[in-house]
Image: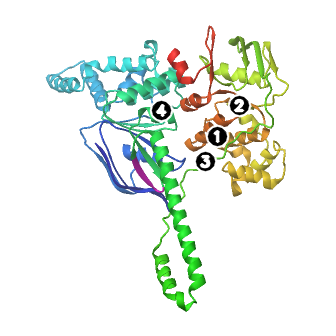
Amino acid sequence: MLVSTGVTIRFGKRVLFEDVNIRFGKGNCYGIIGANGAGKSTFLKVLSGEIEPSKGEVTHDKTERLSVLRQDHFAFEDYKVLDTVIMGNEQLYKIMKEKEEIYAKPDFSEEDGMKAAKLEEKFAELDGWNAEADAATLLNDLGILSDLHDKYMREIEAKDKVKVLLAQSLFGNPDILLLDEPTNDLDLKTINWLQEFLINFENTVIVVSHDRYFLNKVCTHIADVDFGKITVYPGNYDFWYESSQLALRQAKDANKKKEEKIKELQEFIARFSANASKSKQATSRKKSLEKIELEEIKPSNRKYPYVDFKPDREPGKEILKVENITKTINGEKLLDNISFTVKSDDKIAFLADNELAKTVLFQIIAGEIEPDSGTITWGTTISNDYFPKDNNYLFTQDASITDWLRQYSKDPDETYVRGFLGRMLFSGEEALKNVKVLSGGEKVRCVLSKLMLSGANFLIFDEPTNHLDMESITSVNEAMVKFKGNLLFTSHDHQLTQTVANRIIDIKSDKVIDKECTYNEYLEIE
């Protein structure tokens, strides 16, 4: 069992969290959630021993093995893929290497034989004879096939390195498993496999993730980093969200009632304190007033941007017709005679074997690049806007966020633009920041603001939740659900895709599948 006792983390005068007391029980999966900068990853590093707490301690049974998903994808470049996975169990790997060195000695002595015998005994206890087979099985399950197992890490692609390090963390049935954003850069098939693995995992898991669907699938508890503390709630992410919103509403309602009571008492005191016949009542009510204390509702670290796409006009019956679109880039045919018609109320999620195919299709539909052949026909009532996956080209000018957004606003008045930016969490001096120095998440919020100001009734989104925190993802998700126009979109966020799409178009290498159904229904068909 892993135990956090009185753990506090301070950086100078700033306190991330203090006096954290949590017992992480076997068989449970804890999802750590909180606003960006709240200290989720820091807490994970404290639990792993990578960071010493400012106060308190973390303890666990020394007979239990703790495993961590490593974030440095280039730390094992000089090791073979299979060895890198086995290194997840440091003790086992060390014994393997010691054995190899002893047996490789040209002058193998009796003392070496005795040492080797002890190593063999320990090796067998750690199930070492099955290590290579177990590591290979993990790799195959994650889509790293046998022809890559004996290659060096420096020889494989970055997307495969991510999977190898995930296999390393899962290898050998660790007693405690710490995972920081394990679904990042993983394809849907691998994420689904990981979900099933963790659901069936019998030991302790502690995971940081922005993927709401993933947290809902795997978590038995939620550890919420907020208000300068960490509070553990039973249940998955949705249960935590609904419970926390209910608690906040109840606290606000309770305060509202107290405020009304205080106001009533204050008015009574003001009216009758000078009236002799009422003076006893006034004194009594004044005492009652002094006993009432408003419960302090601390402002949460979480900030939800206001995202709302309102079309200037309703679309007519003719929306969009895509006919026989073909496109080859760098000698690779990404799109081959792609055709579909968008109907009223369609919100279409696009899937593809090749990620680039979706982006290129959206660029063609948005008019950013030309197809090799085929046509795009828009209805006369349709106005469209586009959220690109790579939005850096939109931020090359030397301008403040306010001036950048002003060029897309029908109302150029600074008060209006600044007010709009405030709702998107760019308040005060933040709105004057130069667009060239914005983070990925800030750029996404800027592009979302541009789309909101456009008044378009047809929106195209290519991975709109990349770089966003969970609060912003929630706001974007809700806005896409409420949008009264048409949507074409791609997203790796399962919950967003499931709640928004009413139609799925899947671009396979040899065909295109077009189904009017939800995302989950499509996965069942597949």
For numbered disc 3, what is the local secondary structure?
Answer: loop
Nearer to the camera, 455 or 333: 455
Cα gap from disc 1 to disc 3, whole angstroms: 17 Å
Residue type at mark 2 is Pro
Q: Residues within 10 Å of mark 4 (few under 14, many from 20)?
A: many
User: Residue, x 73% and y 45% (percent of image)?
Assistant: 435
The residue beneath circle 4 is 214
Cα gap from disc 4 to disc 3, whole angstroms: 21 Å
Q: Are the residues flagged by discs 4 and 1 in contact, CB closer than 8 Å?
A: no
First-in-chain label (2 vs 1) = 2
Residue type at mark 3 is Tyr
Q: Image height check: is 507 above or below 158? A: above
Q: Which residues are magenta?
A: 227-232
Q: Position of residue 76 (x, y in %)?
A: 45, 29
Q: Position of residue 298 (x, y in %)?
A: 51, 60
User: Residue, x 73% and y 31% (percent of image)?
Assistant: 485
Residue 354 lies left or right of residue 254; in this view the side is right
Q: Are the residues flagged by discs 1 and 3 in contact, CB closer than 8 Å?
A: no
Is-magenta flag for residue 275?
A: no
For numbered disc 2, what is the local secondary structure?
Answer: loop
Nearer to the camera, 388 or 160: 388
Residue type at mark 1 is Gly
The residue beneath circle 3 is 304
The residue beneath circle 2 is 388
Q: Position of residue 108 (x, y in %)?
A: 20, 20
The residue beneath circle 1 is 440
